[in-house]
Image (spheres, rainbow, N blue to C red):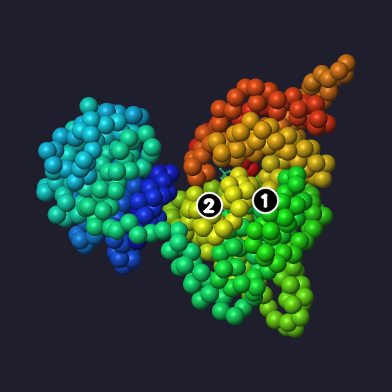
Amino acid sequence: TVLVVDFGAQYAQLIARRVREARVYSEIVPSTTPVEEILARRPKAIVLSGGPSSVYAPGAPVVDPALFEAGVPAFGICYGFQAMASALGGTVARTGTAEFGGTPLEVVAGESTLFHGLPRQQSVWMSHGDAVSEAPPGFSVVARTGATPVAAFEDVDRGLAGVQFHPEVLHSEHGQAVLEHFLYEVAGCTPSWTMTGVIEDQVEAVRAQVGDARVVCGLSGGVDSAVAAALVQRAVGDRLTCVFVDHGLLRKGEAEQVEQDFVAATGVSLKVVDASERFLAALAGLTDPEEKRKAIGREFIRVFEAAALEVVAEAGAHGEQVEFLVQGTLYPDVVESGGGSGTANIKSHHNVGGLPEDLQFRLVEPLRTLFKDEVRRVGLELGLPEAIVWRQPFPGPGLGIRIIGEVTRDRLELLREADAIAREELSAAGLDRDIWQCPVVLLADVRSVGVQGDGRTYGHPVVLRPVSSEDAMTADWSRVPYDVLARISTRITNEVREVNRVVLDVTSKPPGTIEWE
Ligand code: XMP
């Protein structure tokens, strides 16, 4: 394992993914983890991520020099580079000048392991305030930029190296190659981590965890729960029963899709529970996003408990307990909920943070260490159809968090129609793979005046939120062609009663999240 030390910026997850793209397994640890704890995990290497703009920034975390004395190879990136320099006796100049964005970099060393075989001039992505002015003793300076005389250094004998730029972002032309040179040549890692290996390991782990017990899995229709279920089925066969809770917050046609596509692909036994009344009752009067999420999460688990007991009864196994519940929790959920790093709890993703205390299941989470793109690859290897594997992400709380205001049956009906039109038109325009997802949000408590035919209307706006993203951690708003937007707008305002305005959300993440709640 390579451990990525997270200094609190959003970059740590991206770095972890890039390390895995190099086929080396990686995990994230918060920068507050004591050095002994990090070393006790016997990492093959340590990567220090970006973070504050400078080691002089107020409250900037310090790095214990002991981290570099244990002989574990280490790579500092941006803030991590400065922290490494100052821990090892180099100098970070309080220049106060910042470099941001695409920057030309020049390789200055005759021989460099990090830049071996790469062009001597290349463009890199910078985002920093102060800069390293002097490398620590024993290091050679291997690259510079206009404003940064020490833009990369290495001490291959000690297995230490670092770069001021961000090799993990695609704007750094040869960033991945630099990272791989560190991993393979400086740290001696071997590229052996594969999805086949992940499947084998998880099948073993699930068998060991559940023994002879029965397992229930909640299917949401999304790729995560589908892949988790297929993986668990491979491990325990017909001791798995999938339960599909129709909470009434799904999109048009979605329930049918789960029942047909997934069952056809896996032959898994599926129990469908129509619980929409119950969810609506639990949501009545709630407008606060976190309260809505918690209510949905709570009901979800309760409905499961009831369904699980029925599964046992139906199996005719008197008194037998369904002990385990499969969850398609992914690594970013774990990290965002504070389970894997020091990052703040941004939203209580109900499958991680919001579980009720009276939960009667033990959780099986075979995707807990994986990123979304890795889950898709696992799904394909498990033989799931592309339609499931490439389905756009849809949040567990469903349309419940896309109605801003109280959730009611009528409002759900409006939103379902508007959403179906948007999806249909985006697909027809061939944009499915370009767009990560496109939430359609109903501003249920907002009204605006419109005119239709001869009459004044006083209806609600819906928001289109098409985003492009690699992992949902960061996202940009998608530049959907105007004519496609025009068709969506015309159709929604004509076909959906009470919606008289369609607006486009042009906010990236950060600062906006993808969902509105
Ligand atoms: P945000 O809104 O946090 O969303 O930028 C990031 C991604 O997560 C999805 N999402 C959820 N998925 N349960 C889920 O399974 C949830 O409670 C939840 N909330 C947000 C969202 O659709 C996006 O893909």
Q: How many residues crowd around disc 1 within 10 Å: few (fewer than 14), some, or many (20 or more)?
A: many
Does the closest atom of ligand 1 sit within 8 Å of the Cβ of label 1?
yes
Residue 133 located left or right of residue 362 = left
Which residue carries the number 2 mark?
Answer: 376
Residue 490 located left or right of residue 517 = right
Residue shown at 81% from the left, 30% from the top: 495
The image position of residue 441, as x and y in percent, is 69, 37
Q: Does residue 153 show up?
A: no
Q: Is residue 329 above or below residue 320?
A: above
230 and 61: which one is in front? 230
Residue shown at 16% from the left, 51% from the top: 156
Which residue carries the number 1 mark?
Answer: 397
Name the residue at the top extreme: 454
Residue 82 located left or right of residue 89 = right
The label on residue 3 is none
Task: Classify residue 198 by image quadrant.
Answer: bottom left
Image quadrant in which the N terminus is located: bottom left
How far apart, in angstroms, are the residues tagged by discs 2 and 1? 21 Å
Task: Classify residue 312 by image quadrant.
Answer: bottom right
Callout in the foreground (2, 1): 2
177 and 409: which one is in front? 177
Q: Is residue 373 above or below residue 275?
A: above
406 and 469: which one is in front? 469
Q: Does residue 346 show up?
A: yes
Residue shown at 71% from the left, 60% from the top: 244
Residue type at mark 2: give it: Arg
The image position of residue 485, as x and y in percent, is 66, 26
The image position of residue 182, as x and y in percent, is 25, 49
Residue type at mark 1: give it: Pro
Could you tell which of marks 2 and 1 lies nearer the N-terminus? Answer: 2
Q: Is residue 303 above or below residue 284?
A: below
Which structural element holds mark 2?
helix
